[in-house]
Amino acid sequence: MNTPHLRLASPLHRLAAAALLAIAMQAALAQSHAFTLPAQPLDQALAQFARQAKLQLAASAELLRGLRSQPVSGTLDVKAALAELLRGSGLQGRINDGLLTIERGAPRTEAETTLPTVRVKASAERESATGPVSGHVARRSAAGTKTDTPIADTPQSISVIGAQELEDKGSTTLPEALAQTPGVAVNMFGFDSRAPDWVLLRGFDGWYTSSYRDGLVQNVGITFLGVQTEVYGLERIEVVRGPSSVLFGKGDAGGVVNRVSKTPRADAVNEFGLQLGSHGRKQVMADLGGALDSGGQWLWRLVGLGLDTGTQERYPHGVRMEQQRQYLAPSLRWQPTAQTSLTLQAEVLRDDASDDVQYVTGADGQPTRVKEGDPSFSRIRTESDAVGYQFDHRLDGAWRLQQKLRYAERRMDKHHILSWLADATTLERQARHDVESVKELAVDTSVQGTLRTGGIKHTLLLGLDWDRSRASWQRWRDMSSSLDLSRPVYGIPIAEPSTQAADTQQDSTQLGLYAQDQIQLGEPWRLTLGTRRDRVKSVNDDRFYAQRSEQTDNATSSRVGVSYAIGNGWAPYASYAESFVPNVGVDGTGRAFKASRGRQVELGAKYMPDSMPVSFAVAAFSLEKDNVVSYDPSSYEPRQIGKLRSRGLELEAKAELSRQLRMTASFTALDMSILSSANPAEVGNMPILTPRQTGSLWFDYQMGEGALRGLGVGGGVRYVGKRWNDEANTSSEPAYALVDTAVHYDTGRWRVALHITNLFDRHYYAGRAYGSHFVGAERNVVLTAKYRF
């Protein structure tokens, strides 16, 4: 029987061709840059200026202390922009070979490049909720409200990881990027060469409903087809913890992870990069863009990457598991007026990885070094293609219209082995071939604006979103040759399975209408009210067993939150929020499952002073989810009587303690309990593989003076607490702590960085569950070199 296979494009030649085209385009552009620099402390302004002008900065902290910059905005010559920035400060700048040196104003020789004083009409522009994060401290986000709102004014827990933080910490996958985020647990199943976007949010599985891109949902398949994210293509990652259905519709109680794409910017950094690392890692990457015309109406950006790497896992005969990836994301922005912009986006991702991610457990219950599959058979190949746009138009007065649309297709071709022990040394094996696909169209249209009634300011949001997805899954399976655990032999041909075992299609259509009012009562009080009505129609067509079922879920969700700005950057808050997620299927009596509902109460406080780049947040929450589907351990009958409770405390701090020193820290204490289940053994217990505590601390120090100028060092520790291996909570894995470190050197246009995770190569198990042992990530070394121009 013929079964479909996926083909991957050549790893690097398309990326190279695109890069050459981008270089040619860049060479045709004017040498001016687009600057957006508000009036602010001069040291911060110069750091932003150097980044936007693609220069290395050298300036004494004592020289800049107490000084403020002039605002600069517009497409300007570098010298003219810098002269305006420094106007009135008594300082001047000198540029030589990509290095900007700030000195006291004094007569210079003609051999020096002294910047003339040029008057520029300029205006300040604040940080954008979807743009780059300056350093590690983000002040604004749209993830919690769908409006450009200060994080301190949002009465819900939000974490933002910007591109600079991703680079400083050397994150290459989404789980790595979120590993130091409070309320988030990653790598529950240990190291995974397939690099899936699998996280827990406040103890709830985020695989099915937490994935969003630019505010639009990303649906997963029926079995193994999930969402894979190339973090090099992201401007920021935003984590909204707790129920979020008022804004995002169907979603689990733990929250959402919103990935914000890199899009065209006149001040975007142009760079090429090369990465080498452990197990033969080789990666090339490029991030290019700029203006296509002198007026800046047309902007473009191209992000690309090619990866070829081995992994830490290998078969007993020495063959390593591996992964290859190609990624390309072009985008184009047209801004004909200051009130209107249209951004066109596309993304192509190809991933090809080994699929034997677990080691076989022996008859004595102990882990072995035997892989159940074979390197010639076990593969998972995925393709992901997406196109869409973001439209923004400011209407008359204080109102604006926004619409986002994306069409995406994801496909998976998976060959793997299912095995079980027939006796102490014989491993029986079944070869499987799974093919999955998801096609989805998502659109979100909203109108927002401000009204004033007396001394009260209302920021209103009215929106309608619609999402339709079709997921298909087919499986073929046949028995294959057995494996002797004492003397495993690999390379024996495994026949392509030809006996069909599954053929299912699931359609889902969601329509949601939402409304939100952010009310400012005088200067200190902020009140956020929101409501939403959803209608979700699900169709499950099991073509293999000729069974078809339909169900429709209607749900109303609400949210209310209040915060009080007490001054000096402090804002305590309290909130209540709801979520719902449909459950497709029927129970043992044939009744369709109801949607699960989540309800949360959260108390917290945020500290974000205007005078310094510091962010601190603390949150305590109590969250319950009911109508959970659980299964009787004897009859395997599904029963919708499950109920979960999650309570916890989360702390997060990010700060630029000085011009040279940055710090991030987080801590989570989670008390999660199964209140009701069809399996009596798990009632009252903690769900398996869920850590009770997690924490992290990271420092990054940049040398500012002397012979070591440009050199930086970073390091930190990640802590993961005790996890239960079984539903009865009788076996657990001990807590572990891993040390990471980094060394980086910036000189002119070059940046070279060395990152080492699990520095001391600590061996640990993420868990021992479902008859398997999940090995943790070993020490990994990555060297990155980037050239910026």
Image (cartoon, helix red, strand yellow):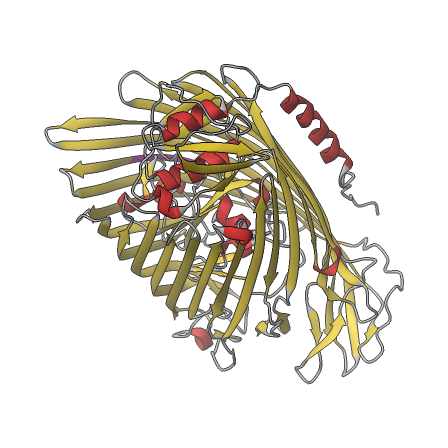
Name the residue at 57% across, 35% down.
98
Which residue ends up furthest to the right in the rendered image? 492
- In magenta, the rendered stretch is 510-515
Which residue lies at the image location 27% right of the left edge and 22% below the top edge? Answer: 398
Q: Could you tell me which residue is drawn at 53 percent across and 50 percent down? A: 709
Percent x, y of residue 318: 82, 68
Q: Is residue 513 magenta?
A: yes
Image: 617 above or below 684: above
Is the C terminus in the top left, top right, bottom left or bottom right quadrant? Answer: top right
Q: In the shown orientation, is residue 205 left or right of residue 572?
A: right
Tally of numbered discs: 0
Q: Taking the image as drawn, is residue 54 in sight?
A: yes
Q: Quadrant of residue 99?
A: top right
- Residue 719 screen position, x and y as percent: 48, 69
Observer-nearest of 261 and 389:
261
- Left/right placement of residue 71 relative to residue 785 reads left
Q: Nearer the viewer, residue 637 or 526?
A: 526
311 shown above or below 530: below
Q: Is residue 217 above or below residue 705?
A: above
Q: Is residue 643 visible?
A: no
In the picture provided, is 773 more to the left or to the right than 72?
Answer: right
Q: Which percent across, then down, holds residue 554?
A: 37, 42
Q: Which secondary structure dominates the residues rendered in magenta?
A: strand
Q: Is residue 543 magenta?
A: no
Q: Residue at x 51, y 62 (%)?
A: 715
